[in-house]
Image (cartoon, coloured by chain):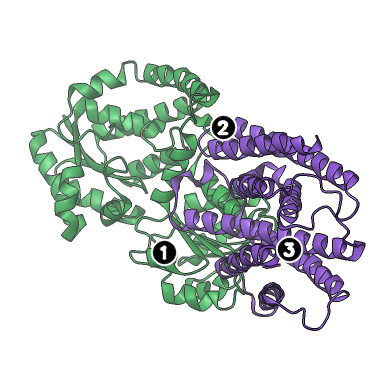
Amino acid sequence: MAELLVWPALLAYGEAAVAYAGSLRGTGASARLGIWGVRIGWLAQTALLVAQALDSDGFPWGTWAGALNLFVWLVVGAYLIWGCTPRYRLLGLAVMPLAVALLVAAWAGGGTGVSSNDTAGWLLALHVGLMLAGFAGLTLAAGLAGLYLWQERRLKQRDTGVLRLRLPPLDSLDRLSARTALISLGVLSAGIVVGLGSFDQGDFDVPMAVTLAIWALYTVGLLLRREKSLRGRRFALLLLAGFALVAIVLPLTHFAS
Amino acid sequence: MRLTLVGVSHRQAPVELRERVAVDAAGATALARELADGCEAVVLSTCNRTELYLASDGPSDHLDERASGTLLALAGDDGAALAPVLYRLGDDSAALHLFRVAAGLDSLVPGEGEILGQVRDAFEGGSTGPLLDRLFRQALHAGRRARVETAIGESPASVPAAAAALAQQVFGDLGGRRILLVGAGKMSELTARNLRSRGAVIEAVANRTEAHGEELATRVESRAVGLEEIPALLATADVVVTSTSAPGFVIDPATAEAALRGRRGRPLLFVDLAVPRDVDPALATIDGCFVYDVDDLEAVVEAARRPQGRGGSRRATRRRRGRALPRVAGLAGSRPRDRLASRPRGGDPQR
């Protein structure tokens, strides 16, 4: 019964995606509809996750579809922190269609149902939770980087509508994306350390290698930003390159195992 | 007495063409003297227009030819491109056009206050006689009344405000941001005041004439420097507002690239209010550099003022326009549209 909660979540996320697309042309009403869609959808998905946790014996999101369900919840939750402010609402244009697509994939893979025979321990649950939270944060940082590149393009091309459809300032997007990447890297590092606790020799595989590559890429990027002033367009491109790796590692992690 | 107006404005000509015929205050005075051979002459040259007003007892065709020839000569190689965008008005139509200009009705941002001072400067620098003297005095009077007695000057949008809003689109909060003013023109002062009201700091006023630079620097609580200090100041400034009357570019890509090396990746916004332009448009291709000239800013203002969708803003605009226009028309004691439509002798500047 609890798995029916996926439908209100999907409907609300879908409504938000459509409303954000509409807000590009219309007034603030569409954007407000969008944010309410995000809020209602996130509450419905939270209820779904709580129901899954209560009905399960162990860690209920151990499968790739379950992890995807949790991942979507984390991404939308992170978006809600900034998405509520009018300036960052348009970030929803990048986030919400992705959330809908991933939640549909999670539902198709059975990740929104309840399985009572999961026996994963708390260490694995913590590891998966931290890794997914880290990846969700990096996804959000990539969304902010995409918004930065869009805003930069409008300013460079002297788009006459730049004061009509106002995006967040370039400087704020640059700083916010770096801060989001830094926090996410910290969470990802914690997830990797927790994962090392249950690491056996011979377990090293492709998903682990790609995860370490992601960690190294973001670490180097943030160090270059601090030491060599890697900012603006080049930093945004680095964040998007990192996200491309995240998009590869997530399916690899779960389909390969 | 016959009155003839020949001119070019933002309505038909882009900045690339307008800057070819733009002259500074001293140039306008000299040109008016040159044209006033046997007639009265006033040259009005601003960012948006260059207009020659001539009056004499002789045939108007002769005045028309002289004014057109002068503008085409100023345009030089671009004369062929200029000829089709020149407008010509005579007598009542020319007078009414001047009233519209002074009242700010012909400005891209209706009611903007800068034009009234520019008309006054043109009048004071012109070679006037009985007709142009009375005409310009009445136009200035009507322009002042239009602003005092109607709502036309209440427009929230203006080029200086747009420049400040653009700076906020790049930097967000302008608190503590450093502004470099290059040139001591009125538009740059208005822009500086707008930026200061949002928390920015005017780091320096770079001007060719030290006394003018000092005057403006005192008014905006800054310091005056020479133009040779611009390269060093570019390394620390966040927004550069230029409005010199220099004939060529004051800031070129080589200067900007050298400055950007010391900026640790911080963006740099150039607001070029000058005609001819002070900032080489090639700067826009440099990573981290954003360049807006006066045409870009006016286009941004116009787009921002355009009502969105079918909602309340369009109704509000109609209401505001409905309040302002009849009163302005009443000042001239006639219906401007009908009279202007009656005698156009060239391209229609009201289009």
Discs 2, 3: same chain: yes
Looking at the rendered structure, the kind of residue marked 3 is: Arg
Quarter of the image for residue B170 reads bottom right
Which residue is denoted by mark 2 in the rendering?
A27
**Colour in which chain B is shown?**
green
Q: Residue B255 in the image: state x and y as whole percent.
A: 46, 75
From the viewer's perspective, is the residue at label 1 or at label 2 nearer? 2
Are the residues at dot 1 and dot 2 in contact (C-beta closer than 8 Å)? no
**Colour in which chain A is shown?**
purple
The residue carrying pointer 2 sits among few (fewer than 14), some (14 to 19) or many (20 or more) residues within 10 Å by Cα, namely some
The residue carrying pointer 1 sits among few (fewer than 14), some (14 to 19) or many (20 or more) residues within 10 Å by Cα, namely many
Looking at the rendered structure, the kind of residue marked 1 is: Val
Instruction: Identify the residue at image location x=38%, y=45%.
Output: B121
Instruction: Identify the residue at image location x=35%, y=53%.
Output: B25
Are the residues at dot 2 and dot 3 in contact (C-beta closer than 8 Å)? no
Among the two numbered marks 2 and 3 on one chain, the one whose residue lies closer to the N terminus: 2
Quarter of the image for residue B178 reads bottom right
Which residue is denoted by mark 1 in the rendering?
B279
Give the CA distance from mark 1 to mark 2.
36 Å
Instruction: Identify the residue at image location x=70%, y=66%.
Output: A253
Name the image quarter holding the N terminus of chain B: top left
Is residue B102 shown left or right of residue B238? Answer: left
Camera-side residue: B221 or B8?
B8
Residue B51 visible here: no
Is disc 2 placed on a helix, strand or loop? loop
Q: Residue A88 in the image: state x and y as whole percent.
A: 66, 47
Which residue is denoted by mark 3 in the rendering?
A179
Camera-side residue: B308 or A135?
A135
Give the CA distance from mark 3 to mark 1.
34 Å
Residue A67 visible here: yes
